[in-house]
Every structure is written in C-alpha cells, then in structure tokens.
Amino acid sequence: MKKVTEIVSELAEPVVKKHGCELWDVEYVKEAGGWVLRVYIDREGGVSLEHCEAVSRELDPILDEKDPIPDSYTFEVSSAGAERTLKRPSDFQKFLGHLVEIKLYRAKDGRKEYIGNLVAGGDGNVEIAINGKPYQFAKPEIANVRLRIS
C-alpha cells in the first residue's frame, strides 16, 4: 500500500508542472494536535505567493475528490525555501558545491552540526568540505541535510 505522501505526490505532480513549477516534497505531519499536509514547490527564479495559491486552488478539489487521507487535515502549498532540506539523490546532485548544514543524531567529534560545502551525496552518505578538509557522514548518523545561506 502506498504512503499518503506518495499518493499526494502523484496527484500533485501534473498540477504543479502545469503552473510552471517543480514538486519539491510532500509531507504529512502531526503538528499542534492536528494533521498537516504540506506540498512544497520550487521554480527557477523563485516561487511567488501567486504560484502557491494557483497550485492550492487547483489541487484542493482533486484531493477532496480522490480522498487519499481519511482524517481531517490542514492543506498548505509552500515554497521549498532557500534553506530547503535535501532528501533525494537528485537534490544532492543539483546542489553539489553549495553550502549545507548537516545535523546528526549523535555528536561526532563533539559536534552535532556541521556546515560545509557539499562534495558528494545522494546514496545516503554525505561528504562535505570545511576549509578544504573532508568530512564524511554515513546515512544512519544523519538526521537532516539542508541548504545553508551564508
């Protein structure tokens, strides 16, 4: 059985593309006692409020009709943001050389956060360079990898 996020991604992809954007991510999370379905979009040159509104207006009735989520939820469409989380192999390839922040589950060498330039990633393992020195992290160590604006 497919996850809610996979079903919503399949429904959202053509709508997002129709509005000149790329589907970045879909999350379905519990926040403040209620469920939130968030669709993140991206676009070369940036995402405007109008893009988010257009995607939301068109996708909302599709979600109502297909009803992939049995519970009540809040639906949001948002920009992926400048400091977006990198998850898929294509995300890592797209942002090679960019500044990223890695958060670890447990401290390594006394630190849980590392900021450096992305050297490699996408297979779950990530390598960054800090002042030219390489640092490697295995997938089980990594809680989150996101772009960092300097």
Image: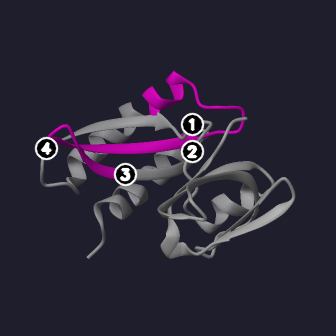
Between the C-alphas of marks 4 and 3, the distance is 15 Å
Earlier residue among tags 3 and 1: 3
Nearest the camera: 49 or 63? 49
Q: Quadrant of the N terminus?
A: bottom left
Residue 140 placed where, x, y %? 49, 75
Q: Is residue 81 left or right of residue 8?
A: right
Residue 21 placed where, x, y %? 59, 41
The amino acid type, in three-letter code, at marker 3 is Glu
Note whether 43 is above or below 66 in the view shown.
above
Earlier residue among tags 4 and 3: 3
The amino acid type, in three-letter code, at marker 2 is Arg
Residue drawn at 19 percent across, 37 percent down: 32
Q: Are marks 1 and 2 in contact (CB under 8 Å)?
A: yes
Residue drawn at 28 percent across, 40 percent down: 61
Residue 81 numbered mark, or none: 1
The amino acid type, in three-letter code, at marker 1 is Gly
Residue 22 placed where, x, y %? 59, 47
Residue 84 numbered mark, or none: 2
Between the C-alphas of marks 1 and 4, the distance is 26 Å
**Residue with the mark numbered 3:** 27
